[in-house]
Image (spheres, helix red, strand yellow):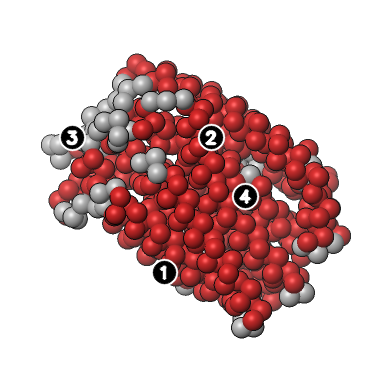
Amino acid sequence: MTQLARFTEGNLMRHVVTMSATSSVGLIAVFFVDLVDMFFISLLGNQALAAAVGFAGAISFLLMSFSIAIGIATGALVARALGQGDAKRAQEVRTHVFAAGLIVMILVTVLAWFNLGILTQLVGARGETQELAIRYLSIIIPSLPLMMLGMGGGAILRAHGDAARSMVATLSAAGANAILDPILIFAVGLGLDGAAIATVVSRFVMAFMGLYPVIKHHGGFAPLQMKAFRKDLSTIWAIAFPATLTNLATPVGSAFVTRVASEFGEQAVAGMAIIGRLTPVAFGLIFALSGAVGPILGQNYGAKLYDRVRKAFSDAVIFTAVYTVFIVGVLWACRGFIADAFGAEAEARDLVFLFCGPLSLAWFFNGVIFIGNAAYNNLGHPFYSTWVNWGRNTIGTIPFVWYGSVWFGPEGVLAGQLFGGVFVAALSWWLAYRVFDRIALEGVPNLRGPAFGVETKAMRLFHMRRGG
């Protein structure tokens, strides 16, 4: 069992730091390539291109949320199975979640591709900028199923504690994108289309590099048995559905912010787009915390080591605080260089300078929310993360952004977006400790129960009616 569940022993802070660092390296590399995309496109000298990438990014993030949800379900269920020492169950879960995920992502891809005009209009794109955003999205959207496979493979590797191979998968994808970007954008002369094609190729690389080590080193996948698959759908649905709702909240909130910023012109949208690409690079380790801490929580939960579950959460929050203070200092020191590198002028430059200062300390609170979501998803309460994330991106975003825009213009939009998370983070912290108290009393549910520990009242009624 120890070999399967490596996080049930040893120093928890070391596990948190190691998993977060290795996970963040690959993740930051992917986000860094997005930042490089923006840099190369800015060199083309057309402000509409930069704005189009900003609008396309909001929609792409929205659609990627489904892939992220599949990855969350995969990682949570595999980690818990490993914590209970059931390698066969882990294989079954991988097969069933991936089968369900492919069906969902194909449907999402088709629906999105035929409704790009509506989607781009909803985020505020108009005229030439809208046409460019649609062209960019029409190339990258068909690769969404590949993104799901790559993210799912990475989640499986992290659930096994194999963060190094998960990092290699994302680094390989980022490397492919970084190499192809200047070739396709400038050497071949494809411009915006070249950036999109490079993204598609990188997703092929991520899917292969994420799945190959799962098959070679971690037992691969069980054969698909339709009867077992249908039985497991409630298990998958119980985590993937609230995880999807959870992850849809962030891009919906981002789309609202983009739309409000668009009222102040293309310079404001371009500034927000630069910040949107810069943020995950600067705070990539915080983005990675949710996926990195999840397996640690899940394995210790499966092994009934509840004190270690609580300690892992606390250590992750402390680590987030230290990292945030450090990175804000780096941003402040480099704010002039960053603005100059992207040719940011007028409102765009003001926004970059505002972000690269004490204002970005507010990202600590987003980190607390991410860690809380990891706890809910891996400890049998995924709907808590749904409510928290939607609270963050509605009550914790819309009024703050709207009032900020009225009183302070585009700078107020950015400040409102960041400060709205303070109250939601406090709620998330409180909910997490309620969950810790509950699992200590109730224990771990049956591994092969109807919903693997996340069964709702509606699901229990469903199984009772079927005689299950």
Residue 156: % across, % down:
36, 47
Q: Earlier in the sequence, mark 3 or mark 1?
A: 1
Q: Check the image and report above or below for 111 versus 392.
A: below
Residue 30, horizontal then vertical, whole percent: 56, 57
Q: Report how far apart the C-alphas of labels 3 and 2 lie in the structure.
A: 44 Å
Q: Please name the residue that numbered disc 4 is placed on.
A: 280
User: Can you identify the residue that label 3 sits on?
Assistant: 464
| Label number found at residue 17 | 2
Give me the C-alpha separation between circle 1 and circle 2. Answer: 39 Å
Q: Earlier in the sequence, mark 3 or mark 4?
A: 4
Which label lies toward us, 2 or 4?
2
Q: How many angstroms separate mark 3 from mark 4 (CA)?
A: 45 Å
Q: Secondary structure at mark 3?
A: helix
Task: Tell me the amino acid under the disc marked 4.
Answer: Pro
Picture quarter with the C terminus: top left
Q: Answer with mark 3 or mark 2, whichever residue precedes in sequence.
A: 2
User: What is the CA distance from the residue labelled 4 to the residue labelled 1?
Assistant: 28 Å
Q: Which residue is mark 1?
A: 110
Question: If you read the primary sequence from the N terminus, does the residue marked by circle 4 or circle 1 appear first?
Answer: 1
Tag 2: residue type?
Val
CB-based contact (under 8 Å), mark 3 and mark 2: no
Tags 1 and 2 touching, CB below 8 Å:
no
Q: Mark 1 or 2, which is nearer the eye?
A: 2
Q: Is residue 451 left or right of residue 377?
A: left
**Mark 4 neighbour class, 10 Å CA radius: few under 14, some 14 to 19, many 20 or more:** many
Front residue of 125 and 443 = 443
